[in-house]
C-alpha cells in the first residue's frame, strides 16, 4: 500500500555538507556554459568523478569498512541535489553510486563487496544497467539473455539494448535467465556482474536525438564468466531487480535535471526583461512546484534513511517530477517566444533546445509513465 | 502530537459533522440554532483555543501541530470557520485583547467607501461566522457579522458571503494588518488538501465497487491511470499544505503560505474532474456526498487568491531576491 508522505527536514549534520560541495562546484564548473551543464547526469567526465571520490562524496551511504562514507541517505540527498542543480557532469559514476553499489552491498557476497565497493567509492569502477533487451522493455520479465552453468562458472549469450554508458563503463549488472523459459516469467532470473572487457562482449553506442551517444547495444557471444559473477541467489533476480529499481527511482533526478534551464531563464528575466504578470506568474509557479516536489523527495529520502523501500512513493514522486520537467521547456519556450523583439541570448536558446530534445526520455527511462502509474494504482488498491 | 490531534478531530467531526449536518447548515435549515449546536461542540472540544497560550488557558500549540485540525475540517467539509477562529484567537491571545465569543472568519478583501462603509466581496464562511477579521493594511479589526448586510457569494450550498457594514462598530481590538490574506490562504490550503483526500478515498471506494462489463471499473487500466494521476495531485497538495503550516510559531510565513495555496489550488481542477468522471452520474447527484467536497474545492481555490495570484507573489519575490539559483530561493525562503 502507498503511505502518506510527511514533511521532514534534512538533519543539520547532513545539511552541513552543502557548503563544501557548493564551494567545490563553484570552482570546478566555473565558466562551463549552461547548455553543457544542462547535460548534468548525462555529462561524462571520469576525472571529475574521481575528484568527487577524493572528497569522499561517492558511496556516501556505503559502510566505511568498504570505503564508503557511512552516512545516511540524507547526506547523499544533499550532495546529489548540489551536483544536479549545478549541472555537474556526473554520469560516469552515477549508476554505480546510485544503484549498483547499494545493490552489491545488499545482495553481494563478502568477496564481491570487498572487491567492488572500494573501487566504486574511489571512482575506479563505473557500472551500467543491463535490463532492457530489444524485445523486453516494459515487460522486463521476458528477457531472453541467458547464462548457462559451466564447470567453472557461467557461459553468457544474448543481447542488451539502451544500456547507458556501456561503452565507457567497466561492469554491467545484467538481468539474465539462468533456468526455465521466458514463459516462466519471474522464476529463473538472476543478476550477473559482467566485466565488459571480457572476450565475447561487443558494445555499440547509439546516438540519441540530441546527437549525443550514451546508450548502447551490447552483444554477448559465449562470454565465459566465473562463479563469482552471480550476485545474490540464483533465481532471485526479479526480487533484486525490483529493489534496484527502487534505488533508481528514489533519487531526485526527476526534479533537478532541468534546473539549469530554469536558472538560466531566471537570470535572463531578472536582467533583460520588463516585469510582466504572465512571466512572473510562470516563474512563481515553477518555484512553487519545485518547492513541493523537493519536500516530497526529502520525505521519500527519510523513508530510505529508516531502511524502508518506498517503491510506490518513489514512483509517485518520479511521475509528478517528470510532468514538471517535461512542461518546463514548453512553458519557457512559450514565454521566450512571446516577444520576438527581445531575443533571448544564444546560450539560453541552446540550453532550451537541449532540454526540449532530451525531455521525452524523462518518462521512459527507469520505467515509463504508464508503468509507474500502474504501480501507483496497485499501491492504491486498484489492482 | 499530530496523530493524537488527527484522531481526536476525526472522532469529533465524525460525531457532530456528518454530511447531513453539513447539508442542513448550508441550506440554513434549523437557522442559527443548528450552527450554534455544532459550534458549541467544537468549542467544548477545546480545539478553538489550540493556539492560545497556556498561560491564557489554551493549549499553546504551534501552527505546525495544528495542521491536522484544518486538514480534518476539510475532510469533513466542516461548514464553520474553525481554523480561522483558532488562528485569530491564537494571535489575539498574544496581545491583551479580550477573546470574543463565537466563530471568527477572515475576509478575503476589503474596500472602504468615502462615507466609511466597509465592503468585502468575498468572505469565506461569511454567511455562518459570528465575527469577520478585516485587514485594512495598516491594521486588522474584528467586525461583528450581525452588523453587516450579507449576500451569498457563491452558488448552491455556499456559505461564503459578500458583506457590507454601513456603520461598522469597530471594536477596540486591533491587530497588526497586511498579512491576513496570506494567513487565510495558508489555512484554507490544508482544508483543501483534506477535501481532496476525501474525494480520493471516495473515488477509490467507488471504483472498486462499481461493476461494468462484468468487473469492477477499478480493473480497467484507463481508470487506474486516471486515479493515479489524481493521487499524485492529492499527495502534492497534502505536502504543499504542510509546507504552509511548517512553523513552530503561530503565524504562517508569507512564502510558505504562498506555495501552500498555489499548489493546492492548482490541484483542484484535475482532482475534481477525475473524481467526477470516475463516479459517473451518481457523483453528479445532490444526494451523493462527493459534491460536498468538490463544490468546496472550487470555492476554496478561489478564496484568498487562486494559484495565479500566488504564483505572481512568489515570482515577484524570487526576482526581487536577485537570486541566480531557484533552488536556493526555495531552500531559504520557502521550506524554512
Ligand atoms: C535515455 C534512456 C536511457 C536508458 N538507459 C537504460 C539503461 O541504462 N539500462 C536499461 O536496461 N534500459 C535503459 N533504458 C530503457 C528503458 O528502461 C526502456 O525504454 C523502458 O523500460 C521502456 O521500454 P521500451 O522503450 O521498450 O518501450 P515499450 O515497453 O515497448 O513501451 C512503449 C509504450 O507502450 C507502453 N506500454 C508498455 N507496456 C504497457 C502496459 N503493460 N500498460 C500500458 N502501457 C504499456 C509504454 O508505457 C510506452 O508508452 C533507457 C532508455 C532511455 C530512453
Image (tube, coloured by chain):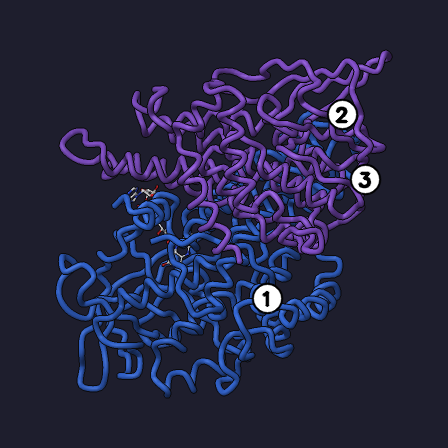
Chain colours: A blue, B purple
The first of marks 1 and 2 along the sequence is 1
Query: Mark 3 to mark 1: distance in Å?
Result: 32 Å
Q: Is residue B181 above or below residue B27?
A: below
In the rendering, at what x and y percent does residue A37 appear?
64, 54
Query: Mark 1 to mark 2: distance in Å?
Result: 39 Å
Q: Residue at x 51, y 65 (%)?
A: A94
Say which of B173 and A127 sits in front.
Answer: B173
Residue A358 seen in the figure:
no
Q: Residues within 10 Å of mark 2 (few under 14, many from 20)?
A: few
In the rendering, at what x and y percent does residue A216 appear?
40, 58
Q: Which residue has dot 2 on it?
A: A341
Q: Is residue A383 left or right of residue A261?
A: left
Residue B21 seen in the figure:
yes
Q: Is residue A344 above or below residue B119?
A: below
Q: Which mark is residue A271?
A: 3
Q: Quadrant of residue A110?
A: bottom left
Give the letter of the chain under mark 2.
A
Query: Mark 3 to mark 2: distance in Å?
Result: 16 Å
In the rendering, at what x and y percent does residue B285 appear?
34, 19
Q: Which residue has dot 1 on it?
A: A45
Q: Residue at x 43, y 49 (%)?
A: A316
The first of marks 3 and 2 along the sequence is 3
Q: Quadrant of residue B316?
A: top right
Amino acid at each position: 500500500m502507498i503511505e502518506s508522505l510527511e514533511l521532514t527536514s534534512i538533519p543539520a549534520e547532513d545539511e552541513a555538507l552543502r557548503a563544501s560541495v557548493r564551494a567545490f562546484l563553484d570552482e570546478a564548473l566555473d565558466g562551463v556554459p549552461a547548455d553543457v551543464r544542462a547535460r548534468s547526469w548525462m555529462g561524462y567526465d571520469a576525472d571529475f568523478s574521481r575528484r568527487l571520490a577524493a572528497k569522499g562524496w561517492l558511496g556516501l551511504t556505503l559502510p566505511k569498512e568498504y570505503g564508503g562514507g557511512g552516512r545516511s541517505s540524507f547526506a547523499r540527498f544533499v550532495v546529489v541535489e548540489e551536483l544536479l542543480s549545478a549541472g555537474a557532469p556526473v554520469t560516469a559514476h552515477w549508476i554505480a553510486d546510485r544503484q549498483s553499489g547499494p545493490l552489491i552491498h545488499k545482495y553481494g557476497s563478502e568477496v564481491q563487496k570487498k572487491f567492488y565497493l572500494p573501487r566504486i567509492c574511489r571512482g575506479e569502477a563505473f557500472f551500467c544497467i543491463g535490463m532492457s533487451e530489444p524485445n523486453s522493455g516494459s515487460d522486463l520479465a521476458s528477457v531472453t539473455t541467458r547464462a548457462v552453468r559451466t564447470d567453472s562458472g557461467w557461459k553468457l549469450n544474448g543481447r542488451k539494448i539502451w544500456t547507458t554508458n556501456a561503452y565507457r563503463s567497466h561492469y554491467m549488472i545484467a538481468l539474465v535467465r539462468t533456468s526455465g523459459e521466458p514463459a516462466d516469467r519471474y522464476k529463473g532470473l538472476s543478476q550477473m556482474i559482467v566485466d565488459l572487457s571480457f572476450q565475447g562482449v561487443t558494445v555499440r553506442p547509439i546516438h540519441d536525438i540530441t546527437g549525443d551517444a550514451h546508450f548502447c547495444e551490447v552483444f554477448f557471444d559465449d562470454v565465459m564468466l566465473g562463479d563469482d559473477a552471480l550476485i545474490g541467489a540464483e533465481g532471485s533476480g526479479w526480487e533484486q531487480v525490483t529493489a534496484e529499481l527502487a534505488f533508481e527511482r528514489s533519487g531526485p533526478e526527476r526534479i533537478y535535471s532541468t534546473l539549469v534551464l530554469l536558472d538560466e531563464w531566471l537570470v535572463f528575466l531578472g536582467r533583460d526583461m520588463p516585469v510582466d504578470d504572465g512571466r512572473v506568474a510562470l516563474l512563481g509557479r515553477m518555484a512553487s512546484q519545485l518547492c513541493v516536489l523537493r519536500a516530497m523527495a526529502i520525505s521519500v529520502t527519510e523513508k530510505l534513511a529508516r531502511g524502508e523501500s518506498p517503491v510506490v512513493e518513489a514512483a509517485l514522486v518520479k511521475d509528478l517530477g517528470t510532468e514538471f520537467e517535461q512542461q518546463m521547456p514548453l512553458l519557457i519556450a512559450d514565454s521566450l517566444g512571446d516577444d520576438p523583439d527581445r531575443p533571448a541570448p544564444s546560450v539560453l536558446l541552446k540550453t532550451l533546445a537541449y532540454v526540449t530534445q532530451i525531455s521525452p526520455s524523462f518518462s521512459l527511462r527507469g520505467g515509463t509513465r504508464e508503468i509507474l502509474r500502474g504501480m501507483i494504482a496497485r499501491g492504491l488498491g486498484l489492482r | 502530537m499530530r496523530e493524537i490531534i488527527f484522531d481526536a478531530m476525526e472522532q469529533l467531526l465524525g460525531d457532530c459533522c456528518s454530511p447531513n449536518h453539513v447539508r442542513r447548515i448550508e441550506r440554513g435549515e434549523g437557522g442559527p440554532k443548528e450552527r450554534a449546536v455544532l459550534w458549541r461542540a467544537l468549542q467544548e472540544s477545546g480545539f478553538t483555543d489550540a493556539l492560545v497560550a497556556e498561560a491564557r488557558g489554551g493549549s499553546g500549540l504551534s501552527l505546525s501541530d495544528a495542521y491536522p485540525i484544518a486538514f480534518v475540517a476539510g475532510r469533513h467539509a466542516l461548514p464553520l470557520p474553525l481554523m480561522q477562529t483558532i488562528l485569530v484567537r491564537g494571535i489575539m491571545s498574544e496581545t491583551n485583547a479580550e477573546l470574543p465569543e463565537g466563530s471568527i472568519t477572515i475576509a478575503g478583501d476589503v474596500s472602504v467607501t468615502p462615507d466609511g462603509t466597509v465592503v468585502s466581496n468575498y468572505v469565506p464562511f461569511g454567511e455562518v461566522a459570528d465575527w469577520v477579521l478585516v485587514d485594512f493594511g495598516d491594521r486588522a479589526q474584528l467586525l461583528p457579522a450581525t452588523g453587516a448586510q450579507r449576500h451569498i457569494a457563491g452558488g448552491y450550498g455556499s456559505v461564503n458571503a459578500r458583506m457590507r457594514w454601513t456603520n461598522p462598530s469597530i471594536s477596540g481590538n486591533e491587530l497588526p494588518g497586511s498579512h491576513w490574506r496570506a494567513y487565510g490562504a495558508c489555512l484554507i490550503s490544508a482544508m483543501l488538501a483534506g477535501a481532496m483526500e476525501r474525494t480520493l478515498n471516495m473515488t477509490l471506494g467507488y471504483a472498486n465497487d462499481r461493476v461494468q462489463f462484468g468487473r469492477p471499473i477499478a480493473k480497467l487500466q484507463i481508470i487506474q491511470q486516471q486515479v493515479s494521476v489524481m493521487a499524485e495531485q492529492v499527495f502534492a497538495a497534502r505536502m504543499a499544505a504542510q509546507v504552509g503550516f511548517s512553523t513552530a510559531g503561530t503565524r504562517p510565513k508569507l512564502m510558505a503560505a504562498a506555495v501552500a495555496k498555489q499548489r493546492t489550488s492548482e490541484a483542484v481542477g484535475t482532482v475534481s474532474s477525475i473524481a467526477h468522471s470516475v463516479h459517473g452520474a451518481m457523483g453528479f447527484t445532490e444526494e451523493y456526498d462527493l459534491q460536498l467536497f468538490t463544490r468546496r474545492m472550487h470555492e476554496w481555490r478561489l478564496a484568498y487568491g487562486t494559484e495565479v495570484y500566488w504564483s505572481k507573489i512568489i515570482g515577484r519575490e524570487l526576482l526581487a531576491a536577485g537570486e541566480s539559483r531557484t533552488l536556493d530561493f526555495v531552500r531559504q525562503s520557502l521550506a524554512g
